[in-house]
Amino acid sequence: MIVPAILLMVCGLSGAIKKGDDLVKNRSFSIDYVNNQFVKDGEPFRYVSGAMHYFRVPVHYWPDRMRKMRAAGLNVLETYVEWASHEPQPGVYAFEGNLDIEYYFELAQHFNLSVILRPGPFIDAERDMGGLPFWLLSVDPSIKLRTSDKSYVTHVEKWFSVLLSKIKPYLYNNGGPIVTVQVENEYGSYSPCDRDYTSWLRDFIRQHLGKDVVLFSTDGDGDGYLQCGKIPGVYATVDFGAGSNAVESFKPQRHFELAGPRVNSEFYPGWLDMWGEPHSTVDKEDVVKTLDDMLAINASVSMYMFHGGTSFGFTSGALPSNTYTPCITSYDYDAPLNEAGDPTEKYFSIRKVISKYLPLPDFPVPVASPKAAYGHVHLHYVANLWDLLSTPIAGRPLQSTYPMTFESLGQANGYVLYCTQLRGHFPDPALLEVKGLADRAYLYIDMEFGGVLSRSGSLFSIPVQATDNQNLCLLVENQGRIAYGTGIKDFKGLTSNVTLNGHILSSWTHHPLPFNETGSLEWLNKIEKKRGTPIKGTMSLFTGSFAIQRNESDLADTFLNLSGWHKGVAFLNGINLGRYWPVQGPQVTLYVPKNFLKAWPSKNRLILLEQDRSPCEKNELGCTVEFVANPVLNGDTPVKKRSTKLFKKHV
């Protein structure tokens, strides 16, 4: 593997790390059951780890984040592997750029960080479908995920054959940094409880990685979770958060592992956020007390998350709490290193606790990187939903008698416009019911906006005034597949028939609008400002360009403030920054890493796909966004209480 030269320069490396015989000789990592500890190269070893997902952090920032994690006293780095990103279509694999896991391992080793690897195949992580590829539901709609179902196992086997061959050279015993590998993920929280599946997965991993690799499982700190989560021959660990009683929380682990080290594989110094619910914060005093308590009894700990990063694009998932609730784009997680990689007060408090138990490296104490406020950018209204249907953005229309799901259409994310011509005489008003909606729909009759239906709001019906021969369309948005629990088999779009006053509507035309090929947006460069003003409730595209009068070396991270806009997606220089929804909160800004920007004299192109309404409708001069130096992740929300309690996500 070739490591990019610019990154080697950043790290101070003169060349790629090589694993020669002198490095491999006498290397070993194992569990000492007599003394309840890990043993590394014949010496007692206890890890203090932090999670940083490579797929959530721009590759150019990996060295910076790892250096800061090592400076905090961490001796281990932890990451999931996301199947969906690496195999976006069956048999099509991606391991370049931000998915270059081999470079991630080599870089960790350079910073003297061992690696805990969690390859899934299911990972949760608040990602779309828990990191499983959507196409599993396309190739076999009846597939039973996370079980010994033949269809599922066949696809896992193909994927793991590719993945594990890349992992094996980086095992600690082979000269690499990987000390432990997880089997599945919090399986005790999954009701099918298929022990044949977890045993098969264990054996398959051992077959490829060898008998000496230390395998572990992770589950909640309760006997009920470990009852199914415990896999014979795999070391069982638990997870729990700040404010817990460490001694009591480790007892369930000891019930299933009578000897061996205490391990909290997910200690939560922060927590996740969802659209429409208040921003999560975890008190640093609770964090450091529980961490201190665990380290005082010689436990090993992995903090989830130490640096959360961002779910760029359409990668964020949803939670099956009281109702379907999508996750925000930011994965700041109130973590010790914030979304932009800056150390927080919590970082320094944690560092102080770690220093009591492990020596701190001779690294400079990290400081926040500079941020830039690049100011306002004026946007022009260039197209609406109906314009898009005749552009390269839209896929080929498909016909069917009844509505097809995204998966049946072979579409992962984005939007689908479903249209049908009404036939018959209907009452005034008639009730339109879309019981199988997943997830949000905009109703149009003869191209006029008629209202919004919402899965997260449990709004599946709406009165309409309709007559014979009118065209009824539903623009359906995929807001993210459910990330954990029994609902991960989460088909998108219209998943059942649509009725109008009890009459099933048929003869549908499907217009795919995936917006995942951002190159298709380049046609916007050739069109002028659209005449007229955008109409509330009709998807509209806005674009603007701006120059940054700085050299490339002077560029700094920034945040795109979308206050005044409603709901949509932002693209910068062809990169999908993610979903925005400031009227719902708590996230108001989108993180923009400096390597997404272009320096003078190049121009930056910003595109907003606004689904509902914009400030441009009332005042053309107000058709702006602003790049600011500080994030807003704690904006106002309609709900004042969270639907999911801190550290109680398991179901």
Image (tube, helix red, strand yellow):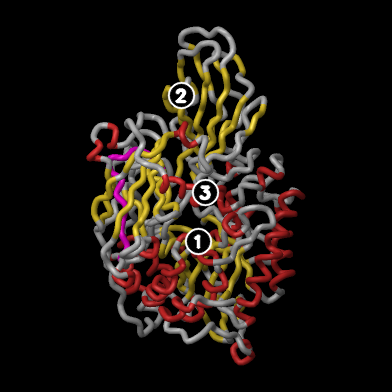
Position of 635 compared to 158: left or right?
left
Q: Is residue 308 magenta?
A: no
26 to 562, vertically: above or below: below
Q: Which residue was labeled with disc 3?
A: 516
Q: Secondary structure at mark 3?
A: loop
Q: Quadrant of the N terminus?
A: bottom right
Which label belongs to residue 55? 1
Which is more foreground, mark 3 or mark 2? Answer: 2
Q: Secondary structure at mark 1?
A: helix
Q: Give the number of the disc on residue 447.
A: 2
Q: Is residue 559 magenta?
A: yes
User: Hey, what amino acid is under mark 1?
Assistant: Phe
Q: Is residue 591 left or right of residue 142?
A: left
- Label 2 neighbour load within 10 Å: few <14, some 14-19, many 20+: some
- The image quadrant of residue 529 is top left
- Residues in magenta? 556-568
Of the pair 515 and 275, the residue shown nearer to us: 515
Q: For residue 24, which quarter of the picture? A: bottom right
Residue 163 visible: yes
Q: In the image shown, does 360 or 242 lie closer to the viewer?
A: 360
Disc 3 versus disc 2: distance between alpha carbons?
25 Å
Mark 2 or mark 1: name the one nearer the start of the chain.
1
Q: Amino acid at mark 3?
A: Asn
Task: Give the Cα separation between the discs numbered 3 and 1.
Answer: 17 Å
For residue 235, side relative to residue 354 (left or right): right
**Residue at left offset 26%, top offset 64%:** 549
Q: Is residue 474 above or below residue 308?
A: above
